[in-house]
Image (cartoon, rainbow, N blue to C red):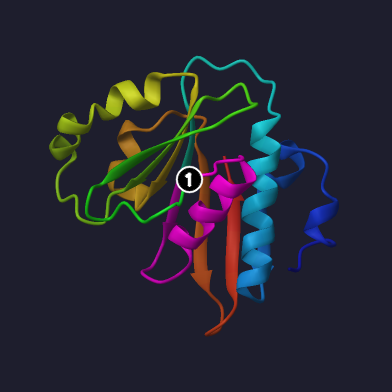
Amino acid sequence: MDEAGPFYFYASLDVMMNKSYISKSTKDTRKLARLLGEELRVYSGKRKSSFVIALSGELGSGKTFFATHLARGLGTKSKIQSPTFVIAKRYTITRSVFKNLWHIDLYRIKKQSELKSLSFKDIIAEPNNIVVIEWAERVSKLLPKDTLWITFFHSSPTARNITFSS
């Protein structure tokens, strides 16, 4: 993983923000996702709503893989599966200010109105939640202003450019 230096030396969530990383392998992507999860697990900021992470990128760019390993960094013990066909899955987080991880995949959503049955607004309003949303650009107008956007680009068949922005 390239950036200014090895990403695993970063000590805080703030340092990771507004940066681009080049992941040369799935191992690099896994490390970056787990690091973010570990940082969120000990996050101490006060929130009025969920910590929302918007994942954006073309099909096969690593969004689900990243979400899976972010969940591991948060300490979830459950098997993490893509919620493409069920749209949303909730996992329990232990030993953290956050209690739930919601993994939402909007690939099959055509209209924002389809989110009403998920209680989407209630999910993102709850400060005890971390909400990871794949294909988040489809509902960008519904997301909080402080959403963390992570964008994935193929830079080669095995490498990804992963950009964090707030």
131 relative to 32 in the view: left or right? left
What is the quadrant of the N terminus in the image? bottom right
Is 76 colored magenta in this rendering? yes
Judge whether 94 appears above or below 7 on screen.
above
51 relative to 38 in the view: left or right? left
Is 71 colored magenta in this rendering? yes
- State the extent of the magenta-drawn residues as a range: 54-77
Q: Which residue is mark 1?
A: 78
Q: Residue at x 49, y 52 (%)?
A: 67
155 relative to 121 in the view: left or right? right
Disc 1 residue type? Ser
Judge whether 151 appears above or below 111 on screen.
below
Q: Residue at x 44, y 59 (%)?
A: 64
**Residue 132's x, y, as percent?**
44, 42
Assess disc 1: are there few (<14), some (14-19) or many (≥20) residues with their C-alpha within 10 Å of its C-alpha: few
Say what secondary structure mark 1 lies in.
Answer: loop
**Residue 85's x, y, as percent?**
22, 54
Give the image quarter of residue 90.
top left
Q: Residue at x 62, y 64 (%)?
A: 29
**Residue 81's x, y, as percent?**
39, 55
